[in-house]
Image: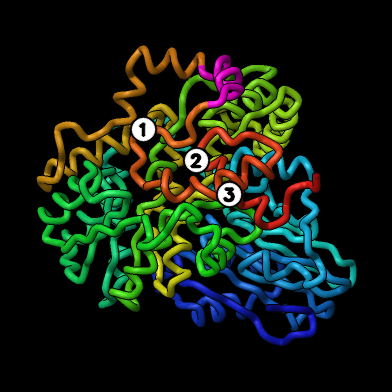
Amino acid sequence: MATPQQATSVARGEAFRTTDSAFLSSDGILQHFSTARSEQDYLQRAAELNGSWYYISNSQPTPSHDIFAFVDHRSTLSLYYRIEGSAIRFSNNGFDLIHANETRIETPPTTLLFFSQWGFTPEDSTLHPDIKRIPVGCGIHFSPSTREVTTLRYDTSLYEGPRLEGIGYEEAKQLFRERLSCAMDRMAQRLESHPVVLPLTAGRDSRLIALALKERDITSVSTCTYGASEGIHEVQRARTIAQKLGFPHHFISTLPTGYDKRGYTQDAEAIKYLKQISGLGSGYFFAEYTTAQQMAQRYPGAVVLPGHNGDIIGGDNLHLRFVEGATRLETNAYLMCFHENGNRRLERNEVAQLANLHQTLLASYPQDKTAIELFETFRNRELMPKYYINSSRSWRYFGLSVWMPFLDKDLCQFMHSLPAPYRIGKRLYEEVSTELFREAGISFANDFSAYQQWQKPAFRVKQLLRPFFVYQHSRRRRPLFPKGDLMGFRQLMAGDLLKEVQHKVPWHPTTINGLSFAWWLQYNNCLPKD
């Protein structure tokens, strides 16, 4: 896409410029960076954008023809690169940078271990040792004369941004309402007259988006819910929400017609899809494939509004078991190995290796933060942009545009500036959303509340004890397909796929995600030879 010999700059995406609220398309982003000459110029211009974008400049005006490249604050549009002599190659998919004669990817063992547990590679690494990914909220400066790459961070909101430590809880709730409204206003401005597709669940994030569309009189909206069966509770509740707001609703099965036990491992188009949305740094499963494909056929040119990141900014999975003190990095790095469901069975030496990787990551963050803030930084830098956002890439694969209002930069910065107790267990986020739902008549008496669950003594005890028994529990063979299989993973990921993993992968997956990651690594020749 760009080398020192090329005279063109490249930009893709769309964003609001914070200095004047102008909405910029790809051409506007090119113009926005066109007068930058120094590292500081580029950093300032990148920090002024709020949206989904990337930019590559050949920096022709400089004597050395240095190249600068940047991604947005959550790298919703990924950018990979590979240095080849005095040149550098870029792509939005790491697979494009693999040479034709490379038939097997020699992934470093520690990277492979991290990937097998989390489903993505850490920091700027990918499964290929020579192919890198620009980190979230960052750019790179490549010098052809030295063949060196310098990482430039412009988004410091999680590290050095102001903290509203003295703010009262009720004031924080009101300010959140205002910031949320502003983010939804920007969403509405982006939509203009385009048709809208809203993936709607029974949860809070997509319901807040649906309410915002209704309040702004945006009527060209079609909602959809996908799953294994139209009769499940999630689908029925989503349909009720859509009907109350006056939007049409579609159910789309995640089980493609005619699939047998071989599943998507035998579908060339599905393999192409998975390779595109996963890049070379993450695994992913198949749930959105049929949904995105069908909605793109029904509504060409539509803008999709996924509800991603509401959980992250709200404070989901933030618990008080993380410890402070002199050994906090070492202890919390170990606890992270079991914070969420482990995706594979780990040997004792692998737990130690994984904990060391976690500790290195935590140590790279500013150490004036609390233990919870350090873990939250990990979720924002690693988990959100490298795994959760893959769902939104499904829609782009089939030619639809995507706008994610809960990734609004101003909204993210505000939420992360609040005192941690306001966000632990999604307390403030859930209270405000519940109030808004009641005002609009779309609340339910039994709406799930993470904060109420977190308040229960039994749940707190379970969270405190979890790291001490999860390792032993993971050693046991247990069903991969749990009760409440809403997406139909039992059909999608069993059969030949499961047999292939059991015979060719040197570890035992313990979750649906773990099975998907294991198969993905095996299929792409990333696992060591027998």
Q: CA distance from mark 1 to mark 3?
A: 41 Å
The disc, 2 or 3, on the residue closer to the chain's N-terminal end is 3
Amino acid under label 3?
A: Thr
Q: Position of residue 235 (x, y in %)?
A: 23, 48
- SS of the residue at dot 1? loop
Contact between labelled residues 1 and 2, with CB atoms less than 8 Å apart:
no
Q: Which residue is mark 2?
A: 512
Q: Position of residue 388 (x, y in %)?
A: 48, 50
- The dot on residue 483 is 1
- SS of the residue at dot 2? helix
Residue 407 against residue 400 in the figure, above or below: above
- SS of the residue at dot 3? loop
**Which residues fall within the magenta stretch?**
466-477
- The dot on residue 396 is none
Amino acid under label 1?
A: Lys
Amino acid under label 2?
A: Ile
Q: Residue furthest bottom?
A: 7
Residue 194 against residue 280 in the figure, above or below: below
Q: In percent of the image, x 46 and y 55: which residue is there?
A: 286
Are there few (<14), some (14-19), or many (20+) residues within 10 Å of tag 3?
few
Residue 19 against residue 326 in the figure, above or below: below
The disc, 1 or 3, on the residue closer to the chain's N-terminal end is 3
Q: CA distance from mark 2 to mark 1?
A: 12 Å
Task: Please say whether residue 48 is visible from this viewpoint.
Answer: no
Q: Which residue is mark 3?
A: 156
Identify the image quadrant of residue 295.
Answer: bottom left
